[in-house]
Image: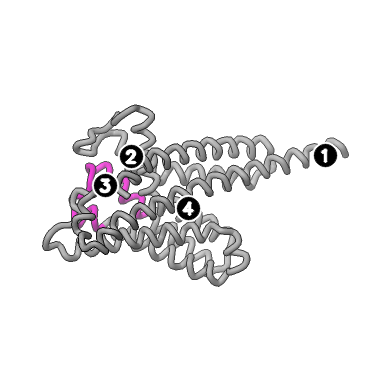
Amino acid sequence: MNRSHSALMISSTSTRWLTRSAVAWTTVAVTGQLFFALYITMLYGSGLVAGRFAEALDTVMPRGHVPGDTVGNAVIASHLFMAVLMIVLSGVQLLPVIRRRAPHLHRWSGRAFATLASLLAVGGLYLVWVRGGAAGDGGNHLGVSSNALVILFCAFMAVRAGRARNISTHRRWALRLYLAANGVWFFRIGLTLWLVINGGPVGFDPNTFTGPFLTGLAFAQFLLPLLVLEGYLRAREQQRAVVHMTMATVLILCTVATAAGIASATMILWWPRM
């Protein structure tokens, strides 16, 4: 009886550690994503208000504004502002209090999030393959395009499971969609963390924005977060304390790396332009 009680206590403790580590990562990630949304709003929103939106588009992107390209300019402008709204909605979707106390709001904000993520994915494919001029080479473009296709698939699966009232499956696909849809953000914090760790560009040419590291990062920006998520989801299904504690340790390390990436992106990319 005592042995059984001790095993139960160990299992309960490991489960709490797993849950808390997941909450810690989510809190850090959502905070960093909201800061990214604030950066987009301040950089491009202020340009719009001041009548310098075209100039603001060219601040970071190599072909942000192209004279005469009405469709392309409209796509990239809508892309930016939809991204801000999507980031905010993704944070709302992760709040348990919204799911419990305002399920109607959760459903509608979820539909809006899935729609925006899908539109951004299609817009990204257009900007890379139709408009052209996106930074990087074919490897980078293939990674970004794969990310877009994964977003579309996850959105479809999440919505389908939600309509079927299969809540467990819906939540799994919604979490996958959340991570895949924030691939651009993961790319930025991964890139700047790499720059800080190495003291400069290693594994790529900063002038052409090409190289093996960037090609790998273009795929890792969505595959690595999804891999960690799958590990977490499978660990939750296990009753073994060692599995819970191992996954909790992985999530704690991810939390530290994410926080460091957010700090580096803030110092290198966002704060100087806000």
Q: CA distance from mark 3 to mark 2?
A: 23 Å
Residues 115 and 156: in front is: 115
* x and y percentages locating residue 77 in the rendered image: 26, 61
What residue is disc 1 on?
Answer: 4
Q: CA distance from mark 3 to mark 1?
A: 54 Å
Q: Going from the N terminus, do you reach mark 3 or mark 1 first? A: 1
Kind of element beneath mark 1:
helix
User: Is residue 133 a member of the stretch shown in magenta?
Assistant: yes
- In contact (CB < 8 Å): disc 1 and disc 2: no
Nearer the camera: disc 2 or disc 4: 2
Q: CA distance from mark 4 to mark 3?
A: 21 Å
What residue is disc 2 on?
Answer: 268
Q: Residue furthest left?
A: 68
Q: Which residue is found at the position 38% from the left and 48% from the top? A: 185
Badge 2, how many Cα within 10 Å: few under 14, some, many 20+?
A: some
Indicate left or right for 114 with 162 as reference. Answer: left
Instruction: Indicate which disc residue 141 carries.
Output: 3
Q: Going from the N terminus, do you reach mark 3 or mark 2 first? A: 3
What residue is disc 4 on?
Answer: 176
Q: Which residue is found at the position 58% from the left and 64% from the top? A: 99
Q: Amino acid at mark 1?
A: Ser
Q: Which residue is found at the position 34% from the left and 33% from the top? A: 195
Kind of element beneath mark 3:
helix
* x and y percentages locating residue 230 in the rendered image: 52, 46
Residues 259 and 233: in front is: 259
Q: CA distance from mark 1 to mark 2?
A: 53 Å
Q: CA distance from mark 2 to mark 4?
A: 28 Å
Q: Amino acid at mark 3?
A: His
Give the main secondary structure of the magenta stretch: helix
